[in-house]
Image: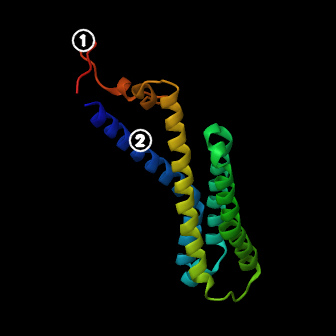
């Protein structure tokens, strides 16, 4: 029963992790969605892929990913063994995603006729940046979960947030929770 209970808890945690991460991405992308809708409304669909907006979004997400990797490196002492790998991941991210996204942002801000390859590169950078952000959050959350378990806290206490949901459940007169 304990193993089944732990599996259910892990699935709930994974679900919350996904929801929180996707919510972060949606909030980051919200201003760009407004720009996208305005561009479509004006009838300039080609400008969506050739404008600097996708590169800006990729830069933001990549920067957040790098900060999450640094957060994991600094906050978790057990990652010290792997610090060379983490630094390699950060360096690779800078070299392959952030710098190209920033250069494209600068170039596209002033270009009158950008090359059409940009229409393929920008979405690819954005997809890689989103994937990297999801991975960074997953790594940080996995390490935080291990820390909670190592500190000896009960899993139920770890599941309780700032606002316990049990308070919202109706109670009968004897103080028992009803379903």
Mark 2: few/some/many CA within 10 Å (<14, 14-19, 20+): some
Residue at image coords 74%, 74%: 103
Instruction: Answer whether residue 90 is visible to the viewer in this image.
Output: yes
How far is disc 2 from disc 1 in space, using C-alphas?
Answer: 33 Å
Q: As displayed, is residue 42 above or below residue 81?
A: below
Q: As displayed, is residue 93 above or below residue 71?
A: below
In this rendering, position of residue 10 left or right of residue 56 = left
Mark 1: few/some/many CA within 10 Å (<14, 14-19, 20+): few
Residue at image coords 56%, 74%: 124
Among the two numbered marks 2 and 1 on one chain, the one whose residue lies closer to the N terminus: 2
* Residue 97 in which image quadrant: bottom right
Rendering coords of residue 85 (x, y %): 64, 55
Give the farthest residue toward the front: 81
Count of marks overlaid on the render: 2
Q: As displayed, is residue 6 above or below residue 19?
A: above
- The residue carrying mark 1 is 173
* Residue 55 in which image quadrant: bottom right
Q: Quadrant of the N terminus?
A: top left
Give the foreground label among 2 and 1.
2
Q: Element at badge 2?
A: helix
In this rendering, position of residue 32 left or right of residue 91 = left
Rendering coords of residue 152 (x, y %): 48, 24
Residue at image coords 64%, 45%: 81
Q: Element at badge 1?
A: loop
Rendering coords of residue 92 (x, y %): 67, 64
Q: Colour mode?
A: rainbow
In this rendering, position of residue 20 left or right of residue 39 = left
Residue 13: mark? 2
Give the farthest residue toward the top: 174
* Residue 49 in which image quadrant: bottom right
Report if the CB atoms under discs 2 and 1 are less than 8 Å apart. Answer: no
**Of 118 and 113, which appears nearest the observer?**
118
């Amino acid at each position: 029963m304990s193993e089944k209970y732990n599996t259910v808890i892990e699935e709930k945690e994974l679900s919350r992790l996904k929801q929180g991460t996707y919510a972060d991405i949606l909030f980051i992308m919200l201003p760009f969605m407004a720009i996208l809708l305005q561009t479509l409304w004006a009838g300039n669909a080609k400008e969506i892929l050739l404008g600097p907006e996708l590169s800006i979004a990729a830069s933001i997400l990549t920067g957040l990913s790098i900060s999450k990797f640094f957060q994991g490196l600094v906050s978790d002492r057990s990652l010290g063994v792997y610090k060379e790998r983490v630094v390699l991941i950060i360096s690779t991210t800078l070299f392959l995603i952030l710098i190209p996204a920033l250069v494209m942002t600068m170039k596209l801000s002033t270009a009158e006729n950008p090359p059409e390859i940009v229409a393929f590169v920008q979405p690819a950078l954005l997809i890689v940046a989103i994937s990297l952000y999801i991975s960074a959050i997953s790594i940080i959350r996995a390490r935080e979960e291990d820390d909670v378990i190592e500190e000896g806290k009960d899993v139920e206490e770890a599941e309780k947030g700032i606002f316990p949901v049990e308070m919202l459940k109706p109670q009968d007169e004897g103080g028992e929770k009803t379903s």
